[in-house]
Image (cartoon, grey):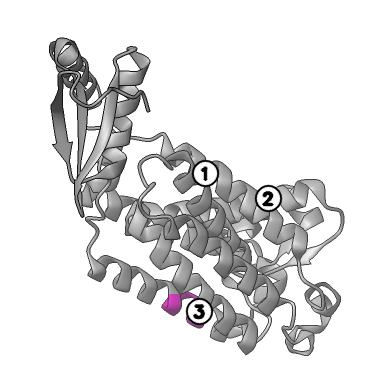
Amino acid sequence: MNDIQHGSGEVVLLRASSQSKIHELALVLKAMSIEYAVRQEGPSTWAILVLEDDFARARDEVQRYDQENRGWPPRYEEVFRKSDWVTSVGVFVAVLVVMHVASSRGAFGFDWYRLGAADGPAMRDGEWWRAITALTLHSGLSHLLGNLVFGSFFAWVVTQTLGAGLGWAAIVLAGSLGFALEALVRGDFASIGASTGVFAALGVQVAHQWRLRRVYRGVAWKRWAPVLAGLVLLGYLGISDPQESPDWMAREVARIDVLGHAAGFVTGCVVGWCLGAGPRGVQESSRVQALLGGLALAAIAGAWCVALLGAR
């Protein structure tokens, strides 16, 4: 702070109840080489004083600064309805439960695990749909319940930021890209589970919030809560029961699919970072949100149609 002597003709330039705002404007004066002093006048009132001869120039500089920075950072209010999140999570739970019942019982005579698992060699041979269908398969009840719990939590976090439709579209896209990336960098492997999508959701949220960290600087929990939950999820998956896995993939499920989770997180970060640069209007349009949510469901249904029809 530049000091000015008491009684040297100082006048109050402005008062504010925010100390951070006072310090912000004081930096403006300092940058313009204008002498100033900050004085606390009450429990929640601060003032900036300047020399009387500098008052006009200081006032002009502060006004110019306020005009240039008006509307920044933009206010990203959470305008998404609670019912949107509840409905979307209900659909998420229904899809995973129905798919688990169908796959575990071999519904309609299909071996759902062999047809839909993320199989490295098969995916490299062009069976792209496995990157999507694998997200809906689970090795056992504990595997399913864990992903339902953590998936619902991350869905709440992501959809509160992006909206229900865009949020789920981002999760499905990033999760399937995670399996695709794993197929490219890993050899012979078989993997299933929504956990890759859950880690993709973690990546979406972290990257999106980091990209817009100046906008969300007042709500730090949105950046750190997903990370902490992700660590808890990783620990939970580490104690899952491999005995519940189908025999053909028992060896794969017996250990954490660390690469798959890492791939999901990486692709989620890419998707989240890109969405952070997108227009806000997309998120605020209920029609666009509904369309994107429908596309996410259509992608899952379409992938399974291709998988099942190819088995006949």
Image spot of residue 167 (x, y percent): 40, 55
Name the side, left or right, on which 259 lies relative to 286.
right
Residue 82 visible somewhere in the drawing: yes
Q: Secondary structure at mark 3?
A: helix
Of labels 2 and 3, earlier in sequence is: 3
Q: Residue 261 shows which numbered tag?
A: none
Q: Residue furthest front?
A: 7
Q: CA distance from mark 2 to mark 3?
A: 25 Å
Q: Which mark is residue 180?
A: 2
Tell me how far mark 2 sits from mark 1, CA to CA. Answer: 14 Å
> Could you say whether the residue bearing mark 2 is in a helix, strand or loop?
helix
* Occupied quadrant, residue 51: top left
Give the magenta part as a residue range.
93-98
User: Three-letter amino acid code at disc 1?
Assistant: Val
Q: Is residue 219 left or right of residue 63?
A: right
Residue 149 is marked as 3
Q: Would residue 96 be counted in the magenta stretch?
A: yes
